[in-house]
Image (cartoon, rainbow, N blue to C red):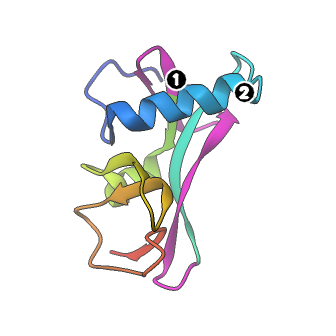
Amino acid sequence: MTTTAILPVTLTAGAIVQLKRIRDEQNITAQHGLRIGVKGGGCSGFTYVLGFDTKKDGDQTFEVEGMPVFMQKSALMYLMGMEIDWVEGLQNRGFSFNNPNATESCGCGTSFSA
């Protein structure tokens, strides 16, 4: 199912630049899109999934700046309204997840509970 509605997750301009850079540097094919999701684990219960993947059965498909984005329906309840940003500073460098649904998160910023 392809949806033209608003993406349930926001990607900042900085995140989009970095994702496109990674896609180009790693020669990721047009059959791949950006997978955003969650999986069990991490110190707070869930861990974010962010990477390039092929479409799977049951995926919701969105598009951001010409890049396909895949999400499992089950992840939507945990990720709705989340912002993904690229942070580059003295202490850390990488993607950050600002999730309004998280009731707790760990120090690493990649694990949360809801």
- The picture places residue 28, in percent across and down from the top left corner, at 74, 25
Is 57 within the magenta? Answer: yes
Query: How packed is label 1: few (under 14 Cα within 10 Å), some, or many (20 or more)?
Result: some
Number of labels in the image equals: 2
Q: Nearer the viewer, residue 103 or 24?
A: 24
Q: Residue at x 34, y 30 (%)?
A: 13
Viewer-side label of 1, 2: 2
- The picture places residue 38, in percent across and down from the top left corner, at 51, 60
Residue 85 lies left or right of residue 31; in this view the side is left
Q: Residue at x 41, y 17 (%)?
A: 65
Q: Which residues are magenta?
A: 42-68
Residue 34 appears anywhere in the view = yes
The type of residue carrying mark 1 is: Pro
Q: Nearer the viewer, residue 57 or 78?
A: 78
Q: Quadrant of residue 106?
A: bottom left
Q: Earlier in the sequence, mark 1 or mark 2?
A: 2
SS type, badge 2: helix
What distance separates the C-alpha of mark 1 from that of mark 2?
Answer: 17 Å
SS type, badge 1: strand
Query: How packed is label 2: few (under 14 Cα within 10 Å), some, or many (20 or more)?
Result: few
> Among all residues in the image, which is located at the extreme bottom?
43
Q: Which mark is residue 68?
A: 1
Vertical comparison of 106 with 28: above or below: below
- The picture places residue 6, in percent across and down from the top left corner, at 25, 28
- The picture places residue 103, in percent across and down from the top left corner, at 26, 78
**Quarter holding the C terminus?**
bottom left
Residue pointed to by mark 2: 25
The type of residue carrying mark 2 is: Glu
Q: Residue at x 24, y 49 (%)?
A: 81
Q: Quadrant of residue 41?
A: bottom right
